[in-house]
Each structure stands twice: as C-alpha cells, then as structure tokens.
Image: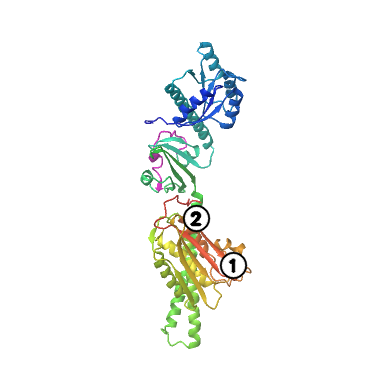
Amino acid sequence: MTGNTHDVRGKILVVDDYPANVKLIRRNLEAEGYETVAAYDGEEALEKVAAEKPDLILLDILMPKLDGFEVCRRIRADEATAVVPIIMVTALRETEDRIQGLEAGADDFLSKPFDRGELLARVKSLLQIKYYRSMLTEREKFHAVIQDLSHGIIITDGRWCVETISRRAAELVGRPDENLVGRGLDELLAPFDVEPSLDALRQSMVRSVTVELTREETRPPTYLAGRYTRIEGPRGELHNAALVFRDISEMRQKEKLKRDFLSLISHKLKTPLTIVGGYLALIAEGSYGEVPPAMAEKVRISLAKVRELSDLIEKVLSYAGLTARELERAGQLVPLGELVERTRRRIEQRYAHRAVNWVIDLPGDLPRARAPEELLSIVVDNLLDNAVKFAEEPEIRIEVGGREIEDREIEVAIRDNGPGIRAQQREQVFSAFAQLDDAFTGNVAGIGLGLSTARRLVNSWGGRIDCDSVPGGGSRFFFTVPSEFTPPRERPDASR
C-alpha cells in the first residue's frame, strides 16, 4: 500500500449458520493475509467475540438461537466490544431490515451473493477506520496521562514539529504559558546546549539515545537529562520522535559541591606532602650530608609512606572527578595487552618491596577494547593494586586473563591468592569508602575508593563488574568492556 494509508491486517470473526458460506468467506480473507475465526450461530458468536477479541465481525442476520440483530445489540452493549466494526452479510434487501441493522449497531452491509472485490474493499475500509479510531482514543488517553507526570514529555512528528507536550516539559524548557504545539523542536531547545547535538540526533539511526540539556545563563543553571527515542515508519523513516527528560539541576549542584570539597581537601593535603617528600628525597640522596645507615632506613620508610599517602590523594581526586557531567562514555580503541603491561610495571614500582608472580593470559587475537583509555587504565590499576595490597601469601600470585563473551564484549578477569572475601561482603566492597576491616582498626591500606571508582567507570561505558571469592582461597574480580566489534546499543543513563 502506498501513500499515507496504513495497510492494516487483523483477526476477523465470520458468523453464518451455513458452513459453505463460512468456508467461502474465510478462503477469500485468508488469501489476503487476514486471520479468521468461525462461529455457526448467535450464541457461539458471542462466545467467540469474548474469547478471540476479533478486529472485525462479518455477521449473518438469519440464524438460529439468536439472530444477527440481537447479536449485534449485545456486542454494542458490552463496553469491551462496543467499537468492534460489524458488517452484516445478508440476503435481506428491504430498507426496513437495513434500518433495523443500523439501529442494532451495524457499521456496514454486504448483500448475498457477495462480490469478492466488494467484500475485501469493505473489510479493508472498516479496519482502517477502526485503526484510526483506536489511534485517536489512545492518543487522547496518552495526552491526559502525561499532563500529570513529573517528567517532561515532548512528542514530535517526522519533521520535528511538536505534536504533544506535557505541562512539565513546557515548564522545564522555560515556556509554561505558551501554546507550543506546531513549534519546531530546534526552536524549543535553542537556549540549551544539547549533548549529543541536535544535528547528531537528527542524523542518528540509533533507536534511543541518552541526552543532556544545559542552560548556563539561568540562575541557578538548569540541567535536564533524559532520553531521545526515534519512532520509525514502515520504511525506516522518522515517523515520530519522543523526548522524555527530568530536572537534575539540584543533583548537579550537589555533585559540584562534593567534587569541589574533595578536590580542595586533596590539594591542601598534597601541597605540604610534596614538600615533605622532596626534602626526604634530598636527605636520602645525601644532599645535606652523609646519612647514617640506621637513619637511611627510617628515611626510606618515610618516603614509602609519603608515596602511599600521595597515591591515596590521587584516588580521592580521581573519585571526585567521576561525579562531573563531563564523564566520557565514547571511547578509543585500546589494545588491552599494552595497557595491562604498562599498569603491571606501574604496580611493581609502587610495591617494589613485594615479590609478585605475574601470569598474563591475553590472547593475541583479542579485539581492542572500546573505552576511554585513561578511565580503563584506572579500572585495571585499581584491581591490580588491590590484588597486591591485600595479599598475605609469602609469594603473591596474580593472574590476568581476557576473553570474548556474548556480543563480542571483552571480559577481563584478575585472580589473586589473597585472603578472599566472605559472601555477605562481596557487594560491600564496591561501595564508596567501604573497607573490609571488621573492627575498623585503620590498619587496612587505602580509604575504600578503588573498587567504587572502578564500578562507576565500568558502568559509564555500559559494562558490569563483580567478583567471585572464597575466604582463604583468593578472589577473582572481573569486568566487561565493549570491543571494537561489539554491536551498538543504548548508552547508560548518566543521570541515574
């Protein structure tokens, strides 16, 4: 079918007390792709209407038990079936009979013997009418419901002109008292910085995209977040667009306060620490004279603790930065083998006094990871750092493996031979500032941000992170990351 007409198919109930008539009608309809159901008297017709919920009924008038007029009246009296189109198929040609049929609720008539073309044309016409009638009904219900939702909702046509907009949406875009139906989406969102851009959204063929809208000139600034969804027509063209969003301004302000506070405290700590570390390094190098062996050992220990504290401050800064809206999701293509090797060398320098047996098993044909390299490096660093930091064995053994899984994602796993984690503590380890120090003695290294940071980063690119562990039997932490061959999918909603 061409043009703006929808080619509607549906289920049709054929009611006639002559099986030959039913068979003939069903054969003609099924040849055109319709689904058919049969009934052979009035009572059976009502049962089939309730059970099958047909989209249209072809109803004979002269039948035993209940005639077609009475069946039609009962169908119209039931709210659940009142709008189902009914075509009366009859040999009666008197005007009075047709008037009686109209009064009973018939939508159309078809005379016996019927012409195949006329049958199909009438069926097609009434199904089209039912389709549009149901669309209007659903649209009215939808419009009524969305007006009281806390989220803003904008529905446009294929040209991005507004068809429906909720009261909340009008408030959020700063135009609560205007009639915005018919306006262009570009016009409504012109005061906002939109990420991804409106041009990118217009060209995108992805069904659903997470969006953020920012308006900095308002006091306080306005931040909105939500989802843009394409609704396509039968040929893949844009039929409608839906934008559902909510106000996250308060959340953004709280994030900024927390980020600024953590950054300020971290920098305040780092400045004197750098000076202390610098002087200790000069002392260790003999810049102020020869250092006695007993003092040299104490200076070495002090320098190690300064570096340890510096690493903790870096973790705080890293964690603080993750709350910013600029957290990247789009990524580069990163060779995992090279990244793991660089991270391993960094960990060895960090824990030079500990002997580690490394087993790296990353196949040469493993696809590259698709993620921001800097953020992926932080995840691997945190997991390897924990594996070494919490190890208790005389010989530390750490295994790093990678493999392709479903949808050609990559799973990276890091196994250690440390003390392990109890089952009830596995979720706790991913919480911010959480440490598995039952008595909170303060003797556990770190401040509990490593795994929390790793989870936030892995979630940011749509992956998942978890662990398997047995007390006394070591732990296996693993996470997933898209590869260069992973099919596109919806991005996570960063506003959550």
Q: Please identify the quadrant where the N terminus is shown.
A: top left
Judge left or right: residue 85 versus residue 7.
right
Q: Amino acid at mark 2?
A: Glu
- Circle count: 2
Q: Nearer the viewer, residue 487 or 179?
A: 487
Counting from the top left corner in percent of width and height, residue 416 is at 52, 70
Q: Evaluate whether residue 322 shows in this view.
A: no
Mark 1 touches mark 2? (CB < 8 Å): no
Magenta stretch: includes residue 211: no
Q: Main secondary structure of the magenta part?
A: loop
Q: Nearer the viewer, residue 262 or 52?
A: 52
**Residue located at (39% from left, 63% from top):** 365
1 or 2: tag closer to the N-terminus? 2
Distance (Cα) linking label 1 and label 2: 36 Å
Residue count near mark 2 (Cα–Cα under 10 Å), binned few <14, some 14–19, many ≥20 = some
Reading the image, the residue beneath label 1 is 470
Specify start and end residues of the magenta stretch as a single range.
175-195
| Image vertical order of residue 102 relative to residue 193, above or below | above
| Image vertical order of residue 77 relative to residue 202, above or below | above
Counting from the top left corner in percent of width and height, residue 328 is at 42, 56
Counting from the top left corner in percent of width and height, residue 258 is at 51, 58
Magenta stretch: includes residue 192: yes
Q: Evaluate whether residue 121 shows in this view.
A: yes
Which element carries disc 1, helix, strand or loop? loop
Residue count near mark 1 (Cα–Cα under 10 Å), binned few <14, some 14–19, many ≥20 = some
Reading the image, the residue beneath label 2 is 255
Tell us which disc is closer to us: 1 or 2.
Answer: 1
Q: Nearer the viewer, residue 29 or 459?
A: 29
Colouring used for the render: rainbow
Counting from the top left corner in percent of width and height, residue 332 is at 38, 59
